[in-house]
Image (cartoon, rainbow, N blue to C red):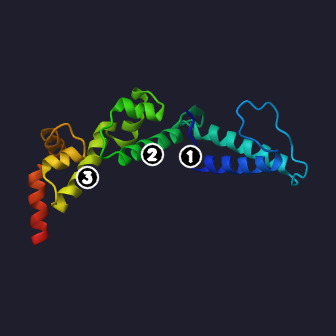
């Protein structure tokens, strides 16, 4: 699956807009063999389409290469990887109350688990599931500070397999137990 980010999306939008001016509808037929030019085409429309295609191709190539120390070109997919990490973070944040498996995440993104794991760890410094647990614990801290739910309810809401696993993750990430965090929140509110 090919995904575009930032400037690429803008160029594709301009390309489609100019293409709609240049060619007769319908343009969305998958197996359409030939496009028919509009009769009254604005001056330069063909050149705009060509230019947008060239810009898109140049941008795609630039996004996938960097230079090494000697100034030589090295193939690298840094921008694609940053976009992938952003997409992963969004998926994880949107599903904080769900139970996501790494297999499900990789299928949704269209990449192998090993590739996702490597890219994410290189960029974020932690694994995907560890980051997902950090997001869940951040939400748990918010819920604990509201003082409306028990720890078991919070563990269930955030889809931890058990309250014990929730407590273990909480202590691992925050350095304190959920009840210790709750006491610290109550002390801060009194002061």
Q: Quadrant of residue 28?
A: top right
What label does residue 86 carry, if any?
A: 2
* Residue at 77% across, 46% down: 19
Q: Which residue is mark 3?
A: 138
User: 115 or 155: which is nearer to us?
Assistant: 155
Q: Pick the quarter of the image with the N terminus.
A: top right
Across and down, in percent, residue 67 comes to: 57, 37
Q: Is residue 165 left or right of residue 138?
A: left
User: 89 or 100: which is nearer to us?
Assistant: 100
Across and down, in percent, residue 162 comes to: 16, 38
Position above or below: 116 against 5: above
Mark 3, other Cα within 10 Å: few <14 / some 14–19 / many ≥20: some
Q: Which residue is mark 1?
A: 5
Across and down, in percent, residue 100 comes to: 33, 37
Helix, strand or loop status at disc 2: helix
* Residue 177 in sight: yes
Is the C-beta separation of discs 2 and 3 under 8 Å? no
Across and down, in percent, residue 121 comes to: 36, 37
First in sequence: mark 2 vs mark 1: 1
Is the C-beta separation of discs 2 and 1 under 8 Å? yes
Position above or below: 190 against 122: below
First in sequence: mark 2 vs mark 3: 2
């Amino acid at each position: 699956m090919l995904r575009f980010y930032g400037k690429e999306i803008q160029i594709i939008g301009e390309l489609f807009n100019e293409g709609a001016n240049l060619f007769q509808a319908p343009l969305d037929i998958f197996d359409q063999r030939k496009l028919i030019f509009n009769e009254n085409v604005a001056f330069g429309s063909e050149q705009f389409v060509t230019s947008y295609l060239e810009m898109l191709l140049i941008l795609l190539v630039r996004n996938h290469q960097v230079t090494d120390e000697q100034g030589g070109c090295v193939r690298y997919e840094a921008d694609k990887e940053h976009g992938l990490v952003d997409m992963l973070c969004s998926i994880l944040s949107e599903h904080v109350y769900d139970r996501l498996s790494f297999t499900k995440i990789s299928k949704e993104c269209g990449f192998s688990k090993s590739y996702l794991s490597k890219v994410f760890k290189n960029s974020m410094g932690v694994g995907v599931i560890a980051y997902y647990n950090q997001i869940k614990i951040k939400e748990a801290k918010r819920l604990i500070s509201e003082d409306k739910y028990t720890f078991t309810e919070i563990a269930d809401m955030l889809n931890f397999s058990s309250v014990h696993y929730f407590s273990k993750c909480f202590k691992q990430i925050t350095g304190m137990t959920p009840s210790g965090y709750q006491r610290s929140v109550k002390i801060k509110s009194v002061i």
